[in-house]
Amino acid sequence: MKNRINRLQPVLIQQFQKNMQHNKLAHAYLFEGARGTGKKELALWVAAGIFCEHKNEGLPCTTCQNCTRILEGHHPDVVEVEPSGLSIKVEQIRYLKSEFGKRGVEGNKKVFIVTDVEKMTAGAANSLLKFLEEPNGNVTAFLLTTAKNRVLPTILSRCQLIHFSPLPKPILQEELENTGVTPNQAALLVHLTNDVTKAVEMSQDEWFIDAHQLIWKWFLKIAKKDKQSFVFVQTSIMNHFKERTHYQMALELLLIIYRDALKLAFDADTKQLAFPRYRQELTRFAEDKSSRIIVSSLEEVLTSQKKLESNVNAQGVFEQLAIRLMDERALLSRE
């Protein structure tokens, strides 16, 4: 486990190594960051360090009985709470509070891990706050969240805040492939989100699969200066992209395609293409167009994104974009 966390969060693993070696753990931590960045894994690893039977300079061996039970979620003094349905109920926190007052089953220590703490009801949050204000006994609490802004400020102020950095794209892509996402899907998804869970969901979403295929077809028509690219907006794009978030996704996908082309034009970081399956077509496009045209095309897409944010009619934005992207004279004269 340590090797995996070290790969995901090398800075944090070093920080907690020092804290455990010098016995300087806080009584409450708030771990905040996107899903899949190692928050739960690090909390369990630190918990293992607290209960380990064969510590090495304060660090868990990960193989003794205590470590094994903690990492498998079976230790009686390491209690985990997660949302029941859409929220964490006050009854769940009352259960935690009752556990706070008990002596540890196998010692005088206890660890509590609360996942998605931002989903606590108001009653649950206020109940938890009382423990954080007056910790009872040798207790260490780990509160995990993907939305720090939705956590009560009073809770935030009583925890040591630990930020989990977004995963580097190569590591995120590897994580996705380990879950069964295809390499081609993973290559695209890492450019759209840093949330492993969300990326996996998107990989299984038929709407999204059709969406990026449609945008690729649209790009090809535009690249060939096919006048049907204008008609394609009405016949295909608008039939599939029907909401404001869909419109933004359409332009984000198109933007990513042009970024791939620019990378190939400059032979820069081509190992991290979002559309490696279309490398040959994108290479031909990059060789046929000047880098200035590709850069101007990127700027046109960005301008269109801003128009959508201003609630300009989406179909009109897409149609105008198709016309401008096919007009190389206009692209070359763009300041």
Image: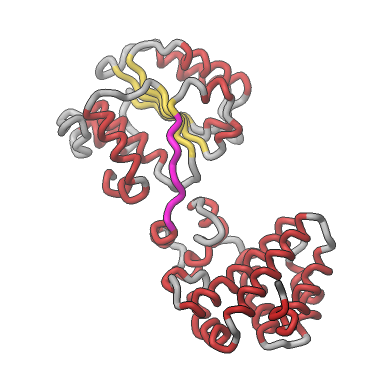
* Residue at the spot 80% in from the left edge and 73% down from the top edge: 320
Answer above or below: position of 8 versus 335.
above
12 versus 166 height, above or below? above
Q: Taking 243 as reference, is 201 left or right?
A: left
Where is the C terminus found, in terms of image quarters? bottom right
Q: Residue at x 46, y 63 (%)?
A: 181
Q: Position of residue 133 (x, y in %)?
A: 48, 13
**Above/below status of 88 relative to 278:** above
Query: Which residue occupies the foreground of this view, 45 or 205?
Result: 45
* Left or right: 330 as drawn, with respect to 207: right
Is residue 322 within the magenta segment?
no
Please tell me whether the stretch drawn in magenta is mainly helix, strand or loop. Answer: loop
Q: Is residue 250 visible?
A: no
Tell me which segment is drawn in magenta.
Answer: 161-168
Q: 124 left or right of 325?
A: left
Tell me the residue at 36%/49% (across/down): 8
Give the residue at x 77% y 70%. 318
216 and 51: which is toward the camera: 216
Q: Quadrant of the N terminus?
A: top left
Corner quadrant of residue 297? bottom right
